[in-house]
Image (tube, helix red, strand yellow):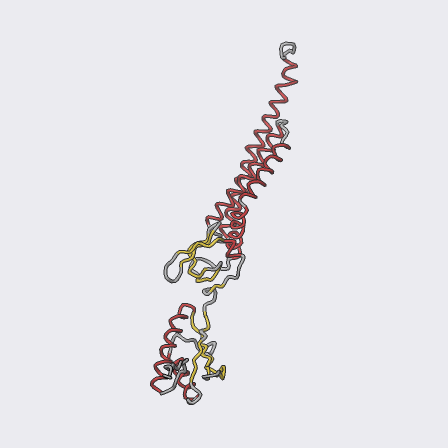
Amino acid sequence: MFENLDLNELLQGYVIPWGTRIIFALAIFYIGRTVVKVVAGWVDKFMRARQMDEVLVKFLTSILHWILLLFVIIAALSQLGIDTTSMVALLGAAGLAIGLSLQSSLSNLAAGVLLIIFRPFTKGNFVEAGGAMGVVQSISIFTTILTTPDNKEVTVPNSAVIGNNITNYSARPTRRVDLVFGVSYGDDLRKAKKLLEDIIAADERILLDPAPTIAVGELADSSVKFLVRPWVKSEDYWAVSWDTIEAVKLRFDEAGITIPFPQMDVHSPTKA
């Protein structure tokens, strides 16, 4: 092929054009790779500044790095005169096939990104989400791990979390304790209310602002129901609830106030 060409024609027709293409392709690759590193580093710093989850930051940065690098490689190959159209089509088809096969995993990934970006809860919060309740231990790119009050570990797919209601019991510094106490119709309502007020006032964990509510809420079939609604710090919620219930029972017993309860009369059959 080259025996009939002199050195000048060889240089002008093949060596210089191909050498120029190779140099430009290498320049595109190395410069593009440097730009990709800079962009990925900037995105990494931006996400860390937003205090996003470290696992998510590394995962998204890695994906961005390889996608941008793929475009750089395609641009370098096209500089060499290689037809990259079929390559792009092949990569697109492969990406579609992978996406369809990993549809559920990708939905969990997208849900994990939303959870970390919008932060409906963070590590250490007590939440009810995805059909489970517990303290958030970690939020990964695919799952959220909770620890239940009895120390069980529950792994919840992120799509189940983001697709349902999320109740965050730790989101606010204070919570209202909602209690209901029934007294007999024959008891002194004023006396019962005064006892409830004394019990609430004696507990230093109960906040003065907002003021606690103690009121007759319902005239039920067998009892008069008092609504007792004090405000407490979120971490004191259960302790105040349990202690108040115990204190009310003891004080009512001492004062002779009856707390009605269902009764069943059992009659033995009479002999014929």
Residue at 38 percent across and 73 percent down: it is 242
Q: Which of 26 and 146 is in front in this view?
A: 146
Q: Which residue lies furthest to the front in this view?
A: 272
Residue at 46 percent across and 54 percent down: it is 156
Quadrant where the image shows the N terminus: top right
Residue 151 drawn at (x, y percent): 37, 59
Residue 21: image quadrant is: top right
Q: Which of 127 and 65 is in front in this view?
A: 127
Quadrant where the image shows the C terminus: bottom left
Q: Is residue 56 above or below residue 242?
A: above
Q: Nearer the viewer, residue 102 or 34?
A: 102
Residue 266 drawn at (x, y percent): 38, 81
Q: Is residue 19 above or below residue 232?
A: above
Residue 113 drawn at (x, y percent): 52, 51
Residue 227 drawn at (x, y percent): 46, 80
Q: How many tags in the picture?
A: 0
